[in-house]
Amino acid sequence: EAKAQGKGRRVTYAPCLDQHSAEQARTAADLRVALDTGQLRLHYQPIVRLSDARTVAVEALVRWQHPERGMVRPDLFIPAAERTGLIVPVGQWVLTEACRQAARWRDELGPDGLEYVSVNVSPRQLREAGFAAQVQATLHSVGLHPRHLTVEVTETAVFDGGSGLEELHQLKRLGVNVALDDFGTGHSSLGLLRTCPVDLLKVDKSFVDNITDRGDRSVIAEALIGISDGLRLRAVAEGVETEAQAGVLRRLGYRYAQGYHFGRPMPAADLAAHVRAAHPATVG
Ligand code: C2E
Ligand code: MG
Ligand code: MG
Ligand code: MG
């Protein structure tokens, strides 16, 4: 637009807005190239059983191996991808890659290896017509049973209207598991838990962070495990960084957790080594 107004003419921007959207457009264009030239990677973070720290599942987290910027974290490009719609092909790539890897791990690690791979699905992806059918086709093509896939959505994504909720019901009918990510931080009500076909609550890191401080910091974490148990859902506590936090969570009745204390997101090869190395040590 600035160019169209002629050379040498000084253009006054609404600086934040325009710079921001120009940056997002550039990021999106670069991301298209990244997708086409294989610069995207998946890292996998252990989801552990709190009783023995055994890795029972993993969450797939996308990374962008940028030729100049190095490893770029998703917070820096997922929003742009979401806004431009590029999240749809990016998300499809993530889904296929994660499911293919999960199928490989079922062969390598056996039936007791990893229960499921968890994949983040953005609001725009979820509302895309035929999303559930695409998931079904992907599972079929890589030979992964639906029970070994968990789809992570946010409360907001489900509430945003459109066909999101219907797609989730279809996924459930397929046998795919549904997790509510960052649970407790969205602008939803607990009523969502009645209409949304959810299996698992991922209790947000913010409710874990100060859990060991004196006072009432663990009250919300305690309330959330109560709700989860009452509805017979599974709960995973996110962002556990210390053994002290893990201890409080165990005492509150949490059975599953995820966080740097148990393992950072890592490449697939490292994750397999991590699982193999950890299991003998955690028996008994
Ligand atoms: P999320 O789904 O809530 O993922 C958890 C984030 O917390 C990850 O950040 C993970 O690395 C980080 N984390 C895990 N344990 C700890 C801990 O103990 N301490 C701290 N400080 N952080 C921890 P990451 O990988 O940077 O991803 C950020 C967000 O980007 C994700 O949040 C998710 O919303 C989004 N995302 C990541 N991969 C994908 C994807 O493939 N598709 C979509 N749509 N979104 C994705
Ligand atoms: Mg997640
Ligand atoms: Mg999360
Ligand atoms: Mg989170």
Image (cartoon, rainbow, N blue to C red):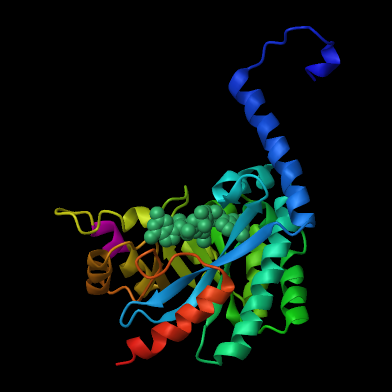
> Residue 77's spot in the image, x, y percent?
62, 46
Magenta residue span: 218-223
Question: Is 138 covered by the magenta stretch?
Answer: no
The majority secondary structure of the magenta stretch comes to helix
Q: Residue furthest left?
A: 214
Q: Residue furthest front?
A: 68
Q: Residue at x 67, y 83 (%)?
A: 144
Q: Residue at x 46, y 82 (%)?
A: 275
Q: Quadrant of residue 69?
A: top right
Q: In the image, is 57 to the left or to the right of 162?
A: left
Q: In the image, is 239 to the left or to the right of 251?
A: right
**Quadrant position of ligand 4:** bottom left
Q: Is residue 68 above or below residue 155?
A: above
> Residue 231's spot in the image, x, y percent?
40, 73
Comparing 250 with 93, the one in front is 93
Q: In the image, is 186 to the left or to the right of 63?
A: left
> Residue 267's spot in the image, x, y percent?
56, 69
Q: Residue at x 62, y 79 (%)?
A: 102
Q: Quadrant of residue 183?
A: bottom left
Quadrant of image for the C terminus: bottom left
Q: Residue at x 71, y 78 (%)?
A: 139
Res. 155 visible in picture: no
Res. 78 visible in picture: yes
> Residue 55's spot in the image, x, y percent?
43, 79
